[in-house]
Image (tube, grey):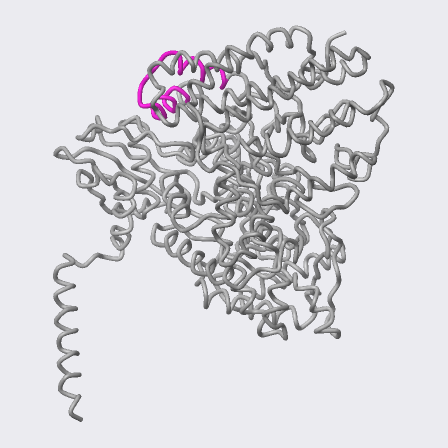
Amino acid sequence: MRSLPSRLLLVAVLAISALASTASAGPRLSREEAFLPAARALVGRILPAHAAQIDVEALPRAADGLDVFEVETRRGRLVLRGHNGVTVGSALNWYLRNVAHAQISWNGDNLNLPAQLPPVPEKVRISSPYRHRVYLNYCTFNYTMSWWDRARWEREIDWMALHGITMPLAATGQEAVWQATLRRFRMNDDEIRRFFAGPAFGAWQWMTNMEQWGGPLPQPWIDSHLELGRFIIERERELGMTPILQGFTGCVPLAFLEKFPAAKILKKQIWCEVPPGTAQLDPEDPLFAEFGRAFLEEQTRLLGTDHLYAGDPFHEGEPPQNTPDYLRDVGAKLFQIAHDFDPQAIIVMQGWTIREGIVKGIPADRLLALDLTGQKWRETQAFWGRPWVAGILHNFGGRHYLGGNLPQLASNAPSLLADPAKGGQLVGVGLFPEAIEINPLLYELATDLAWHRTAPDLPAWTRSYVLARYGRDVPAAQSAWARLVASVYSQRSPEPPMESPLQARPALAAMTTASPWGSFERDYDITQVWTAWGELLTAAESLGSVDPFRYDLVDVARQALADLSLPLQREVTAAWLSGDQARFTAAKARFLDLGTDLDTLLATRRDFLLGPWLADARRWGTTPAEADQFERNARQLITVWGPDSPKAYIFDYACRQWAGLLRGFYLERWKKFFAYLDTQPASYRDDQIARGTNRPNNDASDFYRELSRWEYAWCEAHESYPTEPQGDSVAVARALFAKWSPVMRESCARFDWKKLEPKP
């Protein structure tokens, strides 16, 4: 009883403090203004030195409900108006690009702003014709984001707000959701952690492709990524985004076959030779609805909900039954589970391997289809009348290449929007790359399209982009990018792989690809890339200190050298076949020299280093054993990917042009191959050896068996690679241009780029 007065005193003090806090916080925000603190914090993170000059104000939504922003200068202050953090961020990005000539990007920032922000000539009001702007592919969470921490995610979410993203996929923290759910279904934590794939392979588990590979998953990873996932989702929500969380599609652990023997569970085919496969619950089995509801309950408890549930049954795999009735039942059941739990539920379904039966099992107004490539609408009657998003999938696996089909990219969604007979219920645009942090020009255009009803004028848009990226209008730089847009960025294919044989598993026989489903083809005049490289070197006299420029210079030079590796590799083969040992010795030395120089060039930029990828993986480990496992995952993903099977189905799928990976892995393979050839008779040929996905099989010969053992051993190793750049980008690029441009002219004169072989 003696403590009661002190407790009452404490309550009184807290009440007074609360009143004082409320009073000091200023006027109470209306519902329409509730987003303003988050939007102002965004501005402060992007422009901390200039935030005091910027006012952020609420803007009522347009009558049609579409997003709008306004930008103006009022009494010497920059005013940004929107109705959430995304529209305010988009307003800020418009100002940076079009007035301040500045840029935030994945590959360097240009924020060299004057002390006083330049004024907006006249008020600007811009609206988006697209209700949704969707972002991320499951694969992005591993091919790029496997080892991201909170700081890197904060930076990306700010980038998303600046670039108008309204609907990001959210997959971080899913392990904790599944763990909580599986605990309710006779699985202990050891069994659950063995079920999980490793940290570099979770994306394919959530796409229902596999389980276990790269695991078991340590508990500290599960716990830390639940915390990280909560931060990501909460930050996205406070900026006005609606994250896409996961739905339940019937995929369950293989362990359920034993734990629930009476249930109708079928084992699915193994995906891409990665064992042990997955299991699918029959939608008619009572366990389907029971487990699905439990999953949504646990997900909502841990992560909340925004009523959007990703549901992609049988992604890149066949259903246990492929009849219309079965597929319709699957769609109806997965929607019913979501709707019974959340009456506002909408199923968000990828259009990669979408099936009509499943789609038609879901009410038309409760499905949003994501056309990942922007081309699937052609074979689905615009997704059978459902609302859909026209996407761009420009990168597979994180492979480096400079280019694409900008005219097609710029016109695809606007043309479909203007023609409902073709586009149907097109309601949005989306970015679905398997990896990011590459090809910044293309992604700046892709996100800018969200604010265009018609295709922009590409030459004019590019000039504006270059000015914003570099902060100064330098004629040589403008000429270089005009040349690139007219050549390497105007190819027929929307996603040209443009790989280098330096990355390929070595062989003599004519190789066509470095990765499965890739290509060495070049659909452009490669001399234009070299000319652009030379023009950028001229511009370096004015722009050499601008970080985005230095990245671009290295990237263009990288592409030029990667192109040159094709005729040099073909010369290696031709020299061997000629029987001229001196010619062969010179050809292989020049090919390896090019690869070494490319590694040296890439080493000047952190963006192109292997070291940070491995170091970041190890940093997540809480014990030496965990750090070793995570590094093994990191090495596997970008090289062998899956198990040591004869065909190695997706080996080198995620091949990258990274300093360290070139010198320590790709060039070592070529050196071993050349050393092997030195022991072979002049009659040696390898055009008859067994090949899987366009590469010699792991067991194609004694040499390849030994090479395979070395490749997998590399994934178990722990040698370190630099984590900081070495050398000056401009100086190295200048020296390599002088060294290799004569070789390029000589090689191109004797090389048929259509046939990818020396001229007769």
Which residues make up the magenta segment? 462-485
Give left or right: position of 620 versus 250: left
Give left or right: position of 724 versus 514: left
Residue at 55% across, 23% down: 598
Residue 747 on image: x %, y %? 65, 10
| Residue 665 vs residue 307, the one in the foreground | 665
In the rendered view, would you say 360 is above or below 182? above
In the rendered view, would you say 337 is above or below 674? below
Would residue 479 be counted in the magenta stretch?
yes
Give left or right: position of 328 versus 596: right
| Residue 27 vs residue 509, the one in the foreground | 509
Residue at 34% across, 54% down: 238
Majority SS type along the magenta span: helix
Give left or right: position of 690 versus 71: right
Would residue 140 be counted in the magenta stretch?
no
Residue at 62% across, 55% down: 205
Residue 357 on image: x %, y %? 68, 53
| Residue 523 vs residue 623, the one in the foreground | 623
Quarter of the image with the C terminus is top right
Q: Quadrant of residue 490?
A: top right
In the rendered view, would you say 217 is above or below 444? below
